[in-house]
């Protein structure tokens, strides 16, 4: 049931892709592991029989396991990698003029005199329970700070996704409908330009036009606890617009490619030759097969969105995780940097995993094994 | 009797968009006319690029990938379907005219059950209600000989075999009771023993339902079994058009005559059994994952002769070639070459040992580096094995080009600028350049059109006479075995079924598998299908 | 290759890149004022002596833009070349050696890619001292994960082709197979990939500089110039938008060329060689 042999000079699909920016740029999680290999690691005839009988469940369990493992490795890297790099935090902390005695004291205070494996385990144990220690700069609990700001960041990302996803899918379908005609070409050129714009440029451009010249939006986008939902929404209007613009072009181009792929398949031709109407072909024959790749595209772009908030928050002085992290990096407040890094990576890994699992779920070959 | 389908002076053009150049219009089909009566079958035959699929799709007023019907008429029951609007065409497609594609695996929607897809057109066109459609689908599954017809429709496309899928596609086309079905190479992608079953099922179903058909194929022997009339096409134009009997038994045109007589050459086997070149003894082999692909295979090949290894896909014949080359070391057994045991792995072999065994692949396209010229491709073995350089090397390359009947004007061409047959010739020259004693030929002609393939076979035989090189020739095609082999090995599921001189292997008494294999190869003879179905002993593996 | 077959969009891209490179090379000649010279009031409007106005310290914006091209392109290019060298060597090594080496490299690469690039860079730059070469190295290492992935896929794709098998059967060594059989067939996609990585490097460098973690003042670079002048936005002063537009334009130009290279690559598929 495989397609015919490849002829001619070989170029990978990835390399000959539709757009200059491909999913590989956005997704962090690697291609699927070799099932035989992963099964071998867990071993046991039980697992092998399970894979054979319930391949779908087995694959999903495998993805979940892989993600947890990946997250663990990432935590090790964020903590251990930081330790391995040169630079003495105590000196940084106190400044160059500190006396050796003061450095020694501060090392003890921060717990830097203990072996790193011990500190890692303490840190990881705390992190699992949601305790990331105290900030070196403010002496406050990191978790408390993050708690507030994470909510703000997710609030921003949520509304950006709410607007960008339907818009991107709609525009992608429009581009397919008018393939190789004017609307498609215009969308193509604009989206090519849009993926080349840095987030901060879009952000300041929007501020310049809407907040300064027209005066219809607010800047900076400050939010605080006593604000009503409407006030909050109006405060985040510009940052959301920036995020939407940033993520829209990617998502649209990938959606277009995914739908085009399905529309040019042999089974859609079969449906046409059955004399079915356009609507029925799209709804019944194209959509069930296009849903999986499109959902995959969306999940990958949401992962990108989570990272995109970092720059946008800085531009709009929005009190979220991203700004918190950038500030911490500037003053080298390591507990905060590590906590933020781990949380961002966790979201990223989780969304990539969701993309993979959705793709697995949508594959009829796996849903209905032989 | 009124004509069901009448195609008049058809012209089909395609627009291509070469990058950076103005769009080009290419004429694919010109001046093709034919008539088809109710319940009759017309075979459209030709090589690749003859325009036969394009003509077949015109019966559904459909142009694939930028093709457009730009002239002529397609009359269905006297009405020109090319003049219909979108909804008018949709009421013809899937109701009056249905289509069976070459690759059923791709043509079925992976997301829906087979049964739903089979009855879809009947329901959407209001031809029958669900219960009636399901009843008819069940009937068709039975007629087409599908296993468990009651539950077959509950399965998904990926859950059934290729041969079954092809029959399910036929059921899908027959379900709405159409007046005409277009079969587009429905058996080409199948193994030869499966092909005969599908062919028989299609023929039976057409007769049962009195449906007319356009049957498109490149294999004249296949179409001779099923059609009433035959149209031979070449480069988008009609070469010959007549009854099947006339075309097969008394072809008028040279081109048709060549097609009919292709592969009828038979060579007598060499009798000299002295001087064994290659000896394979009790070879077992397995893939890296432990899957066993060869079980206890032994055979031998005398010097200057041809050993044909014949079998279907999955028989292990190509794996055996990989074992001989050292790409896949055997897990057990020995391979002796000129009385000396060959090292098992590629790495263990000396340059001299490698030189003496060369290989020719099925796809000449992928077997040559697209970034090298013919001069580089043929010249590399010369400099690698014989340290030839400069003018001496060029001279030798020219000599080799003459030997493969191509000539020195091809020296600086790239593979992409050559035709399929020319590419395969260059591949042969590359093998010859090493002055080997043995050439492994892995289906070197099966991707080529019949006349081109015949040219390659003749070239190989000529070269054997000139240089007394030996061949191991891997093929699925019994006709080729008859044409060129001295000894024959029949393989099935990784085991050797039969081995010996050609005359012995290809004459009775047969074992069951060889009997099935021999009887599955279509012969250029009307009525062959019926005769064979009555006499064969074993059901094919495709079920 | 036919010059006429290059589409207009690609010409625009090539022209834009050429202009930026000219600015970078001849910055001292082209710039009307010095890179760090305070020559006027702060945030003077465009026109008059200062074609694009002045920045937050009263330096000539145009001059800094021209000098900025130098820093931005140099650093981005250095990072791209380095990441490419690193990624290609490791990926081809993985593809040709296979087995344990391949597994080790690939799994480690997967791990690196599981952390978003920007987050990774933030964590690492929080620890490391601020030097230009460290910045280039960090950018290169992070980017090389993407190159590794593409390089390995392309190399594996070609490595299973029968002409490579034919070369192995002939007894050719690994070097011949890599440089004469595989590499010539992977140039086109890899060239496109190089352009893509370069565009990404420009954006990434600008983002880091904008966040205050890239190139350190007073050296001019486009991302840093946006950061310097961002406070003017609220007063309606567009000084921050000028370098922003420069980044965007250069990135668009590179992407236009990449777009063409990719289309060319895919139209070569199964078609004629570009002889």
Image: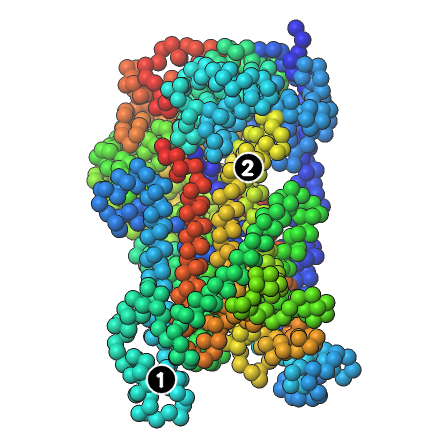
The chain that hosts pointer 1 is A
Residue B527 vs A66, above or below: the answer is above
User: Total marks drawn?
Assistant: 2
**Residue at 31% across / 70% down in the picture?**
A123
Residue B323 vs B5, above or below: the answer is below
Give the residue at mark 2.
A286
- Which quarter of the figure is the C terminus of chain B placed in? top left
Say whether residue B221 is left or right of residue B299. Answer: right
Mark 1 lies on a secondary structure that is helix
Q: Earlier in the sequence, mark 1 or mark 2?
A: 1
Asked whether residue B427 appears in the rendered view, the answer is no
Percent coordinates x, y for residue B1 in the rendering: 66, 6
Which of the numbered marks, if any, corresponds to residue C20?
none
**Residue at 58% across / 26% down in the picture?**
A274
Q: Hey, which residue is sitting farthest top in the picture?
A: B1
Q: Which quarter of the figure has residue C71? A: bottom right
B371 or B427, nearer to the observer = B371
Say whether residue B489 is left or right of residue A360. Answer: left
Which of the numbered marks, if any, corresponds to residue A90?
1
């Amino acid at each position: 049931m495989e397609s015919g042999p490849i002829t001619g000079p070989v170029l990978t699909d990835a390399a000959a892709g539709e757009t200059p920016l491909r999913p590989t740029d956005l997704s962090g999680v690697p291609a699927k592991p070799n099932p035989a290999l992963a099964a071998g690691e867990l071993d046991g005839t039980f697992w092998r029989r399970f894979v054979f009988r319930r391949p779908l469940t087995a694959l999903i369990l495998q993805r979940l396991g892989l993600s947890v493992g990946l997250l663990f490795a990432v935590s090790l890297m964020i903590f251990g990698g930081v330790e391995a790099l040169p630079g003495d935090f105590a000196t940084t902390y106190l400044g160059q003029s500190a006396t050796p005695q003061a450095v020694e004291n501060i090392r003890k205070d921060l717990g830097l005199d203990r072996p790193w494996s011990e500190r890692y385990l303490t840190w990881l144990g705390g992190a699992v329970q949601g305790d990331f220690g105290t900030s070196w700069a403010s002496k406050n609990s990191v978790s408390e700070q993050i708690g507030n700001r994470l909510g703000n960041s997710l609030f921003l990302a949520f509304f950006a996704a709410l607007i960008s996803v339907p818009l991107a899918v709609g525009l992608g379908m429009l581009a397919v409908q008018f393939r190789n005609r004017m609307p498609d070409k215009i969308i193509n050129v604009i989206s090519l330009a849009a993926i080349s714009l840095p987030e901060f440029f879009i952000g300041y451009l929007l501020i310049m036009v809407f907040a300064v010249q027209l005066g219809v939006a607010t800047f900076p986008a400050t939010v605080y606890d006593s604000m009503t939902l409407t006030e909050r929404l109006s405060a985040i209007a510009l940052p959301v617009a920036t995020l939407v613009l940033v993520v829209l072009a990617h998502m649209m181009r990938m959606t277009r490619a995914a739908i085009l792929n399905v529309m040019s398949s042999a089974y859609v031709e079969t449906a046409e030759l059955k004399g079915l109407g356009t609507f029925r072909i799209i709804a019944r024959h194209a959509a069930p097969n296009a849903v999986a790749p499109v959902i995959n595209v969306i999940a990958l772009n949401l992962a990108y969105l989570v990272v995109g908030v970092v720059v946008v928050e800085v531009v709009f002085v929005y009190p979220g995780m991203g700004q918190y992290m950038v500030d911490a990096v500037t003053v080298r407040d390591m507990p905060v940097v590590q906590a933020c890094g781990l949380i961002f990576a966790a979201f990223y890994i989780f969304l990539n995993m969701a993309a993979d699992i959705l793709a697995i779920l949508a594959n009829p070959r796996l849903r209905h094994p032989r | 009797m009124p004509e069901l389908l009448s195609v008049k002076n058809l012209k089909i053009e395609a627009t291509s968009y070469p990058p950076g150049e103005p769009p080009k219009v290419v004429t694919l089909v010109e001046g093709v006319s034919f008539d088809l009566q109710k319940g009759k079958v017309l075979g459209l035959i030709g090589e690749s690029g003859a325009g036969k699929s394009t003509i077949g799709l015109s019966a559904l007023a459909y142009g694939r990938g930028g093709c457009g019907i730009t002239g002529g008429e397609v009359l269905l029951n006297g009405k020109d379907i090319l003049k219909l609007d979108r909804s008018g065409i949709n009421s013809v497609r899937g109701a009056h005219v249905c289509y069976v594609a070459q690759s059923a695996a791709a043509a079925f929607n992976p997301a829906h059950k087979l049964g739903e897809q089979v009855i879809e057109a009947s329901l959407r066109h209001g031809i029958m209600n669900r219960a009636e459609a399901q009843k008819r689908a069940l009937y068709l599954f039975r007629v087409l000989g599908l296993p468990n017809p009651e539950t077959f429709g509950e399965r998904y496309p990926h859950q059934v075999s290729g041969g079954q899928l092809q029959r399910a596609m036929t059921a899908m086309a027959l379900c709405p009771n159409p007046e005409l079905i277009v079969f587009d190479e429905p058996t080409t992608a199948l193994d030869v023993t499966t092909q005969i079953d599908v062919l028989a099922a299609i023929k039976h179903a057409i007769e049962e339902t009195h449906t007319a058909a356009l049957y498109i194929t490149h294999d004249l022997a296949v179409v001779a079994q099923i059609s009433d009339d035959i149209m031979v096409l070449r480069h988008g134009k009609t070469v010959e058009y007549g009854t099947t009997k006339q075309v097969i038994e008394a072809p008028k045109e040279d081109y048709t005559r060549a097609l009919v007589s292709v592969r009828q050459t038979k060579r007598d086997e060499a009798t000299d059994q002295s001087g064994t070149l290659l000896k394979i003894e009790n070879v077992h082999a397995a893939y890296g994952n432990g899957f066993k692909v060869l079980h206890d295979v032994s055979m031998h090949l005398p010097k200057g002769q041809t050993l044909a290894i014949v079998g279907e896909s999955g028989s292990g014949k190509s794996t055996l070639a990989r074992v001989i080359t050292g790409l896949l070391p055997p897990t057990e057994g020995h391979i002796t070459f000129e009385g000396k045991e060959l090292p098992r792995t590629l790495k263990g072999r000396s340059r001299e040992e490698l030189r003496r065994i060369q290989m020719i692949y099925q796809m000449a396209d992928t077997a040559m580096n697209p970034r090298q010229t013919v001069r580089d491709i043929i010249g590399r073995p010369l400099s690698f094995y014989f340290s030839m350089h400069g003018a001496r090397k060029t001279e030798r390359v020219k000599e080799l080009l003459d030997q493969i009947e191509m000539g020195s004007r091809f020296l600086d061409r790239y593979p992409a600028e050559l035709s399929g047959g020319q590419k395969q010739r260059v591949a042969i020259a590359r093998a010859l350049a090493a002055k080997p004693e043995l050439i492994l030929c892995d289906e070197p002609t099966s991707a080529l059109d019949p006349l081109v393939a015949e040219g390659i076979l003749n070239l190989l035989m000529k070269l054997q006479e000139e240089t007394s090189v030996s061949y191991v020739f891997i093929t699925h095609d019994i006709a080729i075995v008859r044409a060129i082999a001295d000894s024959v090995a029949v393989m099935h599921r990784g085991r050797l079924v039969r081995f010996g001189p050609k005359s012995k292997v290809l004459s009775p008494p047969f074992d069951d598998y060889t009997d099935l294999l021999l009887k599955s190869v279509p012969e250029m003879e009307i009525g062959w299908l019926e005769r064979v179905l009555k006499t064969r002993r074993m059901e094919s593996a495709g079920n | 290759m036919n010059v006429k077959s290059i589409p207009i969009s690609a010409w625009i891209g090539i022209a834009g890149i050429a202009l930026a490179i000219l600015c970078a090379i001849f910055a001292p000649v082209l710039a009307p004022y010095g890179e760090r010279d305070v020559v006027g009031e702060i945030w003077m409007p465009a026109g008059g002596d200062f074609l694009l106005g002045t920045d937050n310290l009263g330096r000539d914006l145009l001059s800094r833009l021209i000098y900025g091209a130098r820093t931005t392109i140099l650093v981005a290019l250095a990072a791209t070349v380095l990441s490419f060298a690193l990624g290609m060597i490791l990926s081809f090594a993985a593809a040709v050696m296979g087995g344990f080496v391949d597994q080790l490299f690939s799994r480690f690469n997967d791990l690196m890619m599981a952390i978003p690039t920007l987050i990774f860079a933030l964590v690492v730059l929080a620890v490391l001292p601020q030097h230009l070469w460290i910045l280039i190295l960090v950018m290169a290492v992070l980017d090389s994960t993407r190159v590794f992935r593409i390089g390995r896929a392309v190399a594996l794709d070609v490595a299973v082709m029968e002409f490579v098998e034919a070369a192995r059967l002939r007894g050719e060594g690994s070097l011949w197979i890599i440089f004469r059989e595989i590499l010539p067939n992977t140039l086109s996609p890899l060239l496109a990939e190089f352009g893509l990585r370069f565009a990404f490097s420009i954006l990434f460098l600008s983002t880091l500089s904008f966040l205050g973690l890239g190139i350190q003042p007073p050296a001019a670079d486009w991302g840093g110039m946006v950061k310097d002048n961002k406070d003017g936005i609220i007063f309606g002063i567009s000084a921050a938008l000028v370098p922003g537009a420069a980044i965007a334009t250069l990135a668009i130009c590179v992407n236009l060329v990449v777009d063409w290279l990719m289309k060319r690559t895919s139209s070569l598929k199964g078609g004629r060689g570009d002889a």
